[in-house]
Image: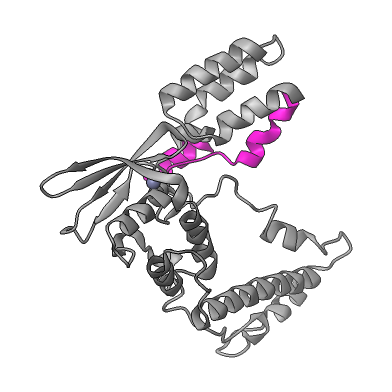
Amino acid sequence: MIRAIRLVLVDVLHRLCSWHVKNMHKHLNYKSLNEFRALLYYSTSPANFEARWHAFVRKWKTDKTEEWLSRMYRKRSLWAASYLSDGFFLGMRSNQRSESLNSCLHLHLDGGMTIVDLVVHYENCIVRLRENEAHDHCVSNQSLPPSVTEYKDIEKHAAQVFTHSNFYILQQDLKKKGELEIFETLVGVDCHTFIMTWRNNRKFQFSVNYRAENSVNTIDCSCGRMLRKGLPCKHILYVLFHLKISKIPKCCILKRMSKVARGGLPAQRKSDIFGWVGQGQSSVLAIVNSV
Ligand SMILES: [Zn+2]
């Protein structure tokens, strides 16, 4: 599978599903699992990962786990967050089938179903998902969540452009603004760089670059959340507030995260599987019954 993806989907960044990597509990004991999870989920630099991995192997390697550990190390760029921090995964680390469509489909499946029952059940599941999506779309487009932080202008603009669920993520980040500070400001000709850090922990620093004249890439941050999740990070929000900018720049508003993400899609479905009769076609049920 890995070789096939590299061959066919050459521009795609391939990530192993973390749910399947979690089969690690077959190979590791419960004491070492938490340390392995930190290697799996916690994003640091690749150099830092290497140091942590070798320390982990020295501590937990046994005759039984040696082969599995060396196999995991060879594939580290496919599962370790440290190597995947630049990938656009929208926060997903697993294929999430178990939480969504898979569980929805499996809920009422049983071995006694006919193929017609199966098709009807599938259609019911899809209809429910579409209804949820339409409901969320309607709520997002017909209401504005209230502002609760003291950074009302940015919050209000975020509420206008982002869907509710994305807005609430940004609202949580705005609430953390008081925990951040600008450690240093570097003023350039075209670009101002703000070195951001936590007030109580200056170990981690992130640089936010602001270019007033560049509408394509007005602002970016070295933490890379915009690249990974498609939403501006708390460092960017802090600098916008610091510069008294009341609107989130266009480069930080991806269409897929905004209220117009469904633009062009019909608000209501015009047909379903039972509506395929006509135009010289048989209905799906007729086809199924003839099998
Ligand atoms: Zn950031």
Q: Position of residue 91 (x, y in %)?
A: 52, 50
Q: Residue furthest bottom?
A: 278
The quarter in which the N terminus is drawn is top right
Residue visible at 54% across and 19% down in the picture? 53
Q: Is residue 94 above or below residue 201?
A: below
Q: Residue furthest right?
A: 112
Viewer-proximal residue among 143 and 244: 244
Res 12 visible: no
Res 59 visible: yes
Please check the rendered image and state whether residue 14 is part of the magenta-colored stretch, yes or no. yes
Q: Residue furthest left?
A: 189
Q: Position of residue 54 (x, y in %)?
A: 53, 15
Viewer-proximal residue among 148 and 87: 148
Q: Position of residue 110 (x, y in %)?
A: 86, 61
Residue visible at 47% across and 20% down in the picture? 50
Residue visible at 64% across and 12% down in the picture? 59
Q: Is residue 212 above or below residue 43?
A: below
Q: Is residue 190 above or below residue 139?
A: above
Q: Is residue 122 left or right of residue 58?
A: right
Please check the rendered image and state whether residue 291 is part of the magenta-colored stretch, yes or no. no
Q: Is residue 255 left or right of residue 27?
A: left
Viewer-proximal residue among 89 and 34: 34
Viewer-proximal residue among 42 and 159: 159
The quarter in which the C terminus is drawn is bottom right
Based on the displayed image, in which of its 4 quarters is residue 122 positioned?
bottom right
Colour scheme of the rendered structure: one colour
Q: Position of residue 282 (x, y in %)?
A: 65, 84
How many circles with numbers are drawn on the protein?
0
Q: Is residue 96 left or right of residue 53?
A: right
Based on the displayed image, in which of its 4 quarters is residue 7 positioned?
top left
Magenta highlight range: 1-29
